[in-house]
Image: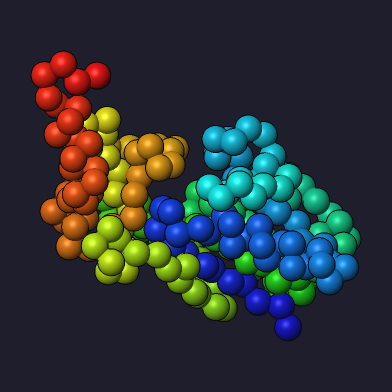
Amino acid sequence: MAKLYFRYGVMGSSKSANALMVRYNYEERGQSALMVKPAIDQREGERVVNSRIGLSFPCVWFEELEQMTPEAIQAHQCIIVDEAQFLTHAQVDYLTEIVDDLNVPVICYGLRADFSGRLFAGSEALLACADIIEEVKTICWCGKKAICNARFDSSGVVLKEGEQVVLGANDCYIGLCRRHWKAGNLGPERSAEKRTAGEPGAE
């Protein structure tokens, strides 16, 4: 029986790379895995999933998946959804229908919580109804497991207030352990950069 998977991790935990490698594994076995992501995420241009390590592959928008016929969906052996935190509750319900009614497995990758520690709507829905929930792990600069998504400004100050969705990558987000997220501590390397930027004559 098909299952709905939710694989979550913080920024920088190689979720997209993991998704792309799973797609490649299907291809190696002569099977098709359809890559999907919400249209809100257009950082890399239209209809492509990119990873920080250079892997990429074309995708369709989630809204296009919703318009596909059951036969078109069943032509694929798996549906892989990147940036699943941006889904709505209704869209996650739709994924359960693909799994339960069409018997096509769906693997979702995304953040669990935002920069302020609140669950994203898509992640909340997936945590409630996914058959299998797995963590894609990475570490904080201190070596402990990173579980929080820190957003920081151009001065290196960790932000705790603001709009929930601000698209970005290593330029404004980093995964931290809970202790250093609470403290707003980005680590000695970034602290040194911050001090240098604040010195007289620094550009």
Tell me the residue at 63%/66% (across/down): 107
The C terminus lies in quadrant: top left
Viewer-proximal residue among 15 and 197: 197
Q: Position of residue 23 (x, y in %)?
A: 72, 62
Q: Nearer the viewer, residue 69 or 131?
A: 131
Image quadrant assignment for residue 32: bottom right
Please state the horizontal and vertical placement of residue 162, each as a whole percent of the image.
27, 37
In the rendered image, residue 202, in percent from the top left (x then y), is placed at: 19, 20
Q: Residue at x 52, y 67 (%)?
A: 7
| Residue 191 appearing in the image | yes
Which residue is pictured at 82% across the width and 67% down the height? Answer: 28
Left or right of 3, for residue 191: left
Q: Is residue 97 above or below residue 183?
A: below
Horizontal and vertical percent position of residue 194: 19, 35
Residue that sits furthest to the top in the current view? 201
Is 174 on the left or on the right of 42, as rendered?
left
Q: Residue, x 73% and y 83% (percent of image)?
A: 1
